[in-house]
Amino acid sequence: MLGQIVRSLGRMQQLSNGLKGVRLHQLLSKETHGHLQTSLENTRAISTVSLWPFSSQPRDFSQPNSSWSPEMRKVYDHYNTLCDPDTENGEEKRGPWRKLPSYNRSIKYAAGGIHLSKLIQAKARLFTRNVKEQGATFEYVVFVNKEEKRCVCVFQAGHLLEGAPGHVHGGAIATMIDTVTGTLAGFLSGPIMTANLNIDYRSPMPLGSVVLIHSALDRKERRKTYITCKVSSTDESKLYTEATALFVSIGVGHLFGSRN
Ligand SMILES: CCCCCCCCCC(=O)SCCNC(=O)CCNC(=O)[C@H](O)C(C)(C)COP(=O)(O)OP(=O)(O)OC[C@H]1O[C@@H](n2cnc3c(N)ncnc32)[C@H](O)[C@@H]1OP(=O)(O)O
């Protein structure tokens, strides 16, 4: 068995060596190459979150899927259109809005530090993206406006997030607030951790709701990034939750027990 694995690895190595120097378009059909090229171009535009340390192509969980309600899709389309480039005098100009991709794993080894077993490291998944059934928990997509230092998340709360009967669990709402404010803080300040989160729950959020989570930079002070957050209905007539969050910038060693 072990011998078989070693031989397979050897064959893969030979194949990989043989492929060196071969261009991508020589390996793929014209159409596949075109799709890949477009998706690479879209990914390149997103500066801080595009480094993917794994060998396989990751799935972007923030793409529309069949569980999305018409309301979720409509708001997504609205913000997605803001990300489209404008053409002026035949020249493409990009506005300040970007859609951020969303994967189900964080950066290898930063998932929990070197003290975790290889098995746990391999199985670790992002909390908000760890249920396979589409629409059951957190369906969301984040759009960021770099110039205005703010972002908006369109969030559809699934049936497995129940807290009070028929309504979304406060911890699930806190999770989304931490995720969205943390995404913005990370986008603006690089590696950070949540130091403080204050939440005011203003009205109960029915399960299945589609809501907007607006986050904005309040201020930066040395290593501290302060973010404000409001959760409302998509027409912004109903306020569900308000929050403030503090993120502290960390060095690479922080998650490994070192202060450097
Ligand atoms: C790709 C998907 C993206 C999803 C984004 C998800 C984001 C989610 C992020 C998280 O949920 S992280 C998990 C929850 N957070 C933690 O586990 C953090 C645990 N706490 C720590 O690791 C440390 O306490 C922390 C990094 C927050 C700060 O420790 P440090 O030793 O680096 O900082 P230090 O104590 O020297 O404080 C630095 C500054 O922050 C201030 N500070 C620290 N903790 C504070 C606090 N809790 N409240 C108020 N201020 C605080 C502190 O007073 C000081 O202010 P000054 O610069 O003015 O002196």
Image (cartoon, rainbow, N blue to C red):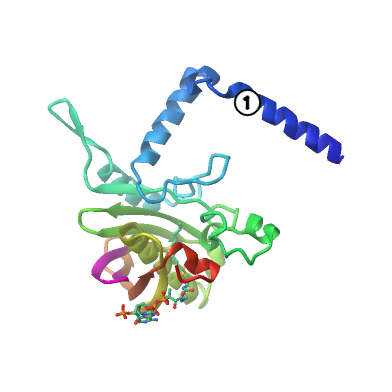
The image shows residue 11 at horizontal and vertical percentages of: 73, 28
The residue at the point 60 percent across, 53 percent down is 132
Please, what secondary structure does the residue beneath circle 1 have?
A: helix
The image shows residue 38 at horizontal and vertical percentages of: 39, 31
Three-letter residue code for mark 1: Asn
Q: Nearer the viewer, residue 68 or 21?
A: 21
237 in the magenta segment = no
Which secondary structure type mostly characterizes the magenta part of the structure?
strand
Q: Nearer the viewer, residue 52 or 165?
A: 52
Residue at numbered disc 1: 17
**Residue 215 in which image quadrant:** bottom left
Q: Nearer the viewer, residue 173 or 246?
A: 246
Q: Is residue 204 visible?
A: no
Q: Is residue 239 left or right of residue 179?
A: left
State the extent of the magenta-drawn residues as a range: 214-229
Label 1, residues with CA under 10 Å away: few <14, some 14-19, many ≥20: few
Q: Is residue 191 visible?
A: yes
The residue at the point 65 percent across, 55 percent down is 122
